[in-house]
Every structure is written in C-alpha cells, then in structure tokens.
Image: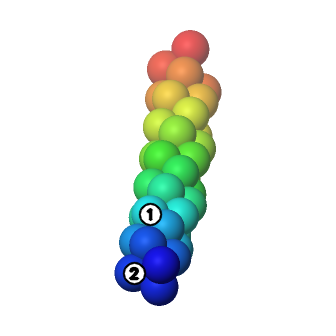
Amino acid sequence: MHNLGAQLTVHTVMGCTAGFIRFGLDQHVIFVITNLRWVNP
C-alpha cells in the first residue's frame, strides 16, 4: 500500500510538471506569434 501511494504521488507530480511546462510553451508560442504579427503587419 505504501508503494502504491508513492507511485501515485510521483504520477501526480509528473502530471503537474508536464501541464506547467506545456502551459509555459503555449504562452511562449502565442507571445512570439503576436510579436511577429506586430513587426510584420
């Protein structure tokens, strides 16, 4: 049971980290596209 709890914790942390990284990448891409559109109308 203890092992299962540890696995669940690791999966939760990895899921949160992946979501955070993906959100950061999405924001970065939107920022770059907006800047390119502003520079080249």
Q: Quadrant of residue 37?
A: top right
Q: Between disc 2 and disc 1, whose residue precedes?
A: 2
In this rendering, is residue 16 above or below 41? below
Residue at x 44%, y 72% (from the top left corner): 4
Q: Which residue is mark 1?
A: 11
Q: Quadrant of residue 10?
A: bottom left
In depth, the one of 23 and 10 nearer the eye is 10
| Mark 2, secondary structure of its residue | helix
Q: Are marks 2 and 1 in contact (CB under 8 Å)?
A: no
The residue carrying pointer 2 sits among few (fewer than 14), some (14 to 19) or many (20 or more) residues within 10 Å by Cα, namely: few
Identify the residue at horizontal 49%, vertical 67% (top origin): 8
User: Outermost residue toward the bottom?
Assistant: 2
Which residue: 44% across, 63% down? 11
Q: Residue 26, labelled with which disc? A: none
Amino acid type of the residue that numbered disc 2 sits on in the rendered structure: Asn
Find residue 3 and name its label: 2
Give the number of the mark in front: 2 or 1. 2
40 lies left or right of 38: left
